[in-house]
Image (spheres, rainbow, N blue to C red):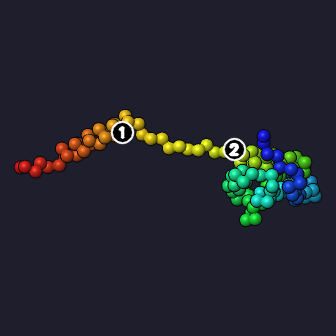
């Protein structure tokens, strides 16, 4: 079951956005800045928290607060939904446990081929050197 971050753990602030919107851009604060405290969130299990901190990269502050900004749309509601969707996608990615890589071993056939090729290269190089008995 996917983790759903409750709205009570999110802080939203609205700022003026650049981009399309005409004079509306100068008057209305439509861009959304979503803040989520990853380190203090009780809803995230520790492994998911660690993966989310790693995934977020430079969007995390030193205090462990994730900051997402959305300013693509002309309305606050659309930008709010966009920011929320991005947060949900990040959390969903962090929930996926990475596969454990088990290193494979070379097969017997590949070992034998490597050794015969090595012997052939060695023999070819020995044939190039001047003969020592003359």
Q: Secondary structure at mark 1?
A: helix
106 sits left or right of 20 in the view: left
Q: Position of residue 64 (x, y in %)?
A: 75, 61
Q: Position of residue 63 (x, y in %)?
A: 75, 65
Foreground residue among 108 and 15:
108
Q: Which residue is mark 2?
A: 96
Q: Residue furthest top?
A: 109
Instruction: Relative to 127, say whether 58 is above or below.
Output: below
Q: Tell me the crowding category of disc 1: few under 14, some 14 to 19, or many 20 or more residues within 10 angstroms, Cα based.
A: few
Residue 57 position by quadrant: bottom right
Whether label 2 touches label 1, CB < 8 Å: no
Foreground residue among 33 and 4:
4
Q: Position of residue 35 (x, y in %)?
A: 82, 58
Which residue shows up at 53% across the image and 43% down it?
Answer: 102
Q: Tell me the crowding category of disc 2: few under 14, some 14 to 19, or many 20 or more residues within 10 angstroms, Cα based.
A: few
Q: Position of residue 71 (x, y in %)?
A: 83, 52
Q: Which residue is mark 1?
A: 111
């Amino acid at each position: 079951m996917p983790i759903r971050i409750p709205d009570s753990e999110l802080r939203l602030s609205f700022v003026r956005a650049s981009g399309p919107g005409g004079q509306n851009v100068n008057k209305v604060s439509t861009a959304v800045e979503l803040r989520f405290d990853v380190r203090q969130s009780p809803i995230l299990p520790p492994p998911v928290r660690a993966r989310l901190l790693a995934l977020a990269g430079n969007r995390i502050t030193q205090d462990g607060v994730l900051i997402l900004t959305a300013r693509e749309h002309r309305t606050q509601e659309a930008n709010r939904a966009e920011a929320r969707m991005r947060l949900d996608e990040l959390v969903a990615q962090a929930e996926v446990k990475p596969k454990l890589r088990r290193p494979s071993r070379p097969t017997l056939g590949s070992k034998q081929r490597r050794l015969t090729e090595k012997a052939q290269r060695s023999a070819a190089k020995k044939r190039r050197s001047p003969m020592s008995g003359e």
